[in-house]
Image (cartoon, helix red, strand yellow):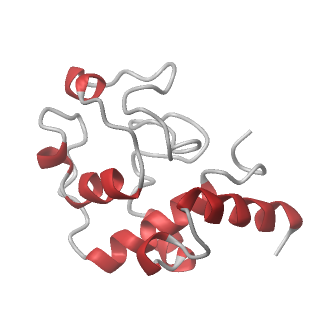
Amino acid sequence: MSVNRLAAALVAALLAGGPGWAAGGDPARGEEIYQRCVACHALAQNRVGPRHCGLFGRKAGAVPNYQYSAAMKKSGTVWDDETLDRFIENPLKAVAGTKMGYAGVKDPQERADLLAYLKQATVDPTICR
């Protein structure tokens, strides 16, 4: 593991409030699951969906130069393990009126793995500058 990746992993663990990853998630498996997201999202730049770098702790609807739905901007959501888990499970239910028309990730372990990957990747200084 490179020094930058190790530093990113340590920062992510600190942000998580403990030594492990999101709900026992596996970031390597989460990276595979993230491939479902890349049709619309990227870590470092906006695409059809907003970028994911800096995701944890960010207020929903706050990425500059991205056109969010009014519902997302007004949601008052701050992204953390709980809010992301709920949103990823069923975006349309979590934020009624969101532009994200994805049915969601129903499997709790897949969501935990995805969140573990996002925690690691979204603070990686080699990706998120």
- Identify which residue is drawn at 24% across, 56% down: 86
- Is 23 left or right of 96, judged from the image as shown? right
**Residue 106: percent from left, percent from top:** 20, 70
**Residue 97: percent from left, percent from top:** 14, 32
Q: Quadrant of residue 48?
A: top left
How many dots with numbers?
A: 0
- Is 5 left or right of 77, judged from the image as shown? right
Q: Quadrant of residue 45?
A: top right
**Of the pair 8 and 129, the residue shown nearer to us:** 8
**Of the pair 69 and 86, the residue shown nearer to us:** 86
- Identify which residue is drawn at 42% across, 32% down: 59
- Is 104 left or right of 16, judged from the image as shown? left
Outermost residue, front side: 17
**From what the image shows, is residue 116 above or below residue 82?**
below
**From what the image shows, is residue 114 above or below residue 91?**
below
Q: Quadrant of residue 119?
A: bottom right
Quadrant housing the N terminus: bottom right
- Identify which residue is drawn at 51% across, 21% down: 64
**Residue 58: percent from left, percent from top:** 48, 36
**Of the pair 42 and 16, the residue shown nearer to us:** 16
**From what the image shows, is residue 96 above or below residue 88?**
above
